[in-house]
Image (cartoon, helix red, strand yellow):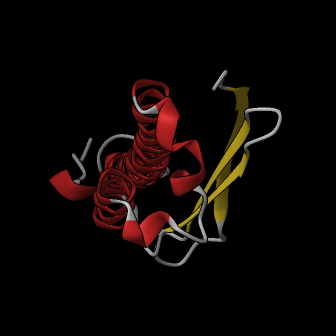
Amino acid sequence: MKQRHVHPRFTGRQGARGFALLEALIAFLILSVGILGVVGLQATMAKAATASKSRADAAYLAQQIIGAIWADRSNLAKYDSATCTTHAPCADWKAKVESTLPSANTAVAVNTATGQLQVQLTWTPPNEPTHTYATTTTVTP
């Protein structure tokens, strides 16, 4: 009986050739999608952290002016937005708001008869809509 010579490349299963390469490509595709997902999540988290810090700063600044008004109740009318720039503590606070929040505007409405005080801060982060923080309290003269 004559032995047949078989080339080593054709031994084994014919359908299994290249399967390991295909598995590696699929694994690489899955890894790439996962990495892109993590990068997107990190960008979203950074944006949310920035927005959260701005809201916290706005709340702090509003409470800061309310505290200053409580300490200076005899000059209650001078904290109104119309006269704020002429009263040093109010003007300093307004400058602090404008330096802390992006594109910030302030509005302080004081009713001297009732002592009601409304503070509103608005700011516009880059490439986002305008945000507003408002609070109301009563200061006894």
Residue that sits furthest to the top in the current view: 140
Q: Give the answer, above or below, for where 64 lies relative to 42.
A: above
Locate the C terminus by quadrant.
Answer: top right
Image quadrant of residue 111?
A: top right
Q: Is residue 120 left or right of residue 66?
A: right
Percent x, y for residue 105? 54, 70
Using the image, determine if residue 10 lies above or below residue 61: below
Please count the marks in the image.
0
At horizontal 64% and vertical 59% (from top left) the residue drawn is 131
Question: Percent position (x, y) of residue 25?
Answer: 37, 56
Instruction: Estimate the x, y position of residue 132 in percent, counting from the top left.
Output: 67, 55
Viewer-nearest residue: 82 or 17: 82
Above or below, 79 against 67 in this view is below
* Figure quadrant of residue 22: bottom left
Residue 13 spot, x, y in % from top left: 42, 42
Task: Please give the name of the residue rendered at 37% of the width and 48% of the height, measured from the top-left corner.
Answer: 46
Quadrant in which the N terminus appears = top left
Can residue 77 be seen? Answer: yes
Q: Is residue 34 left or right of residue 134?
A: left
Residue depicted at x 31% and y 50%: 89
* Residue 17 seen in this snapshot: no
Q: Nearer the viewer, residue 114 or 120?
A: 114
Q: Is residue 109 left or right of residue 36?
A: right
Residue at 71% x, 28% y: name it: 137
Nearest the camera: 90 or 6? 90
Residue located farthest toward the front when viewing the structure as drawn: 74
